[in-house]
Image: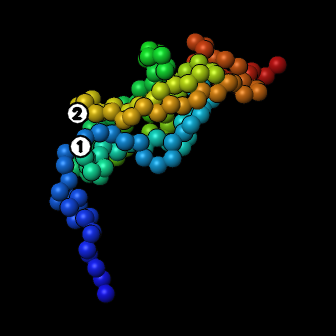
Amino acid sequence: DCSFRGNTAGLYGPDQASDQQSLRFLGTLPHSVVPGDILTPALEVAAVDAYGQVVTTLDDLEVSLEAFLPSGPRISPGGITGDSTSILTKGKTEFSAASLHAPPGSEAVVRAVLLEHELSTPSLLIEVRLCEPGQELGAGGLSCDRCLPG
């Protein structure tokens, strides 16, 4: 005996999906990083509609990552390096080699932006850890580099 009473999934299925409304980070998000290291786990971003469904019709659009200090200024030069831009495929993209460069011991705000449609993710706050033993502050003070032997 199967009952569909109260099941409203059909109202929000693919035939009723709306246009893209926002970007959203998916999956497990990084909470802290050593400056200059790759963000792990990788950031996955999706364009979603008003119902939270991935808009799979969006292809070949560029999504960029931006990094800011909580006080507001954009981290430059290059707060995000490596995978700072990625292309949407069926409404999703992944930044598998994005590195965050920010002052050690600070926090950075990271967000993904789809400029063509004026969409962005909610801000993600990431702790920027101090350099680890065997590392020294790199040029510009926004990364930790391995100490040279000797």
Residue toward you, 85 or 24: 24
**Residue 73 in view (yes/no):** yes
**Residue 89 in view (yes/no):** no
Q: Amino acid at mark 1?
A: Gln
Please tell me which residue is depicted at 63% across the width and 17% down the height of the picture: 138
Q: Residue furthest right?
A: 150
Please tell me which residue is depicted at 60% across the width and 32% down the height of the picture: 33
Labels 1 & 2 near each other (Cβ < 8 A): yes
Provide the secondary structure element on which disc 2 rests.
helix
Q: How many marks?
A: 2
Q: Give the image's coloring scheme.
A: rainbow
Residue toward you, 92 or 148: 92
Q: Is residue 32 left or right of residue 82?
A: right
Please tell me which residue is depicted at 52% across the width and 28% down the height of the picture: 100
Q: Which residue is mark 1?
A: 20
Q: Residue furthest left?
A: 15
Q: Position of residue 150 (x, y in %)?
A: 82, 19
| Classed neighbour count for the residue bearing mark 2: other residues with Cα under 10 Å, few (<14), some (14–19), many (≥20) | few
Provide the secondary structure element on which disc 1 rests.
strand
Please tell me which residue is depicted at 45% across the width and 24% down the height of the picture: 67
Q: Position of residue 120 (x, y in %)?
A: 33, 33
Q: Which residue is mark 2?
A: 117
Rendered position, 49 above or below 125: below
As measured in the structure, the alpha-carbon distance from the residue carrying label 1 to the one carrying label 2 is 8 Å
In what quadrant of the picture does the N terminus appear? Answer: bottom left
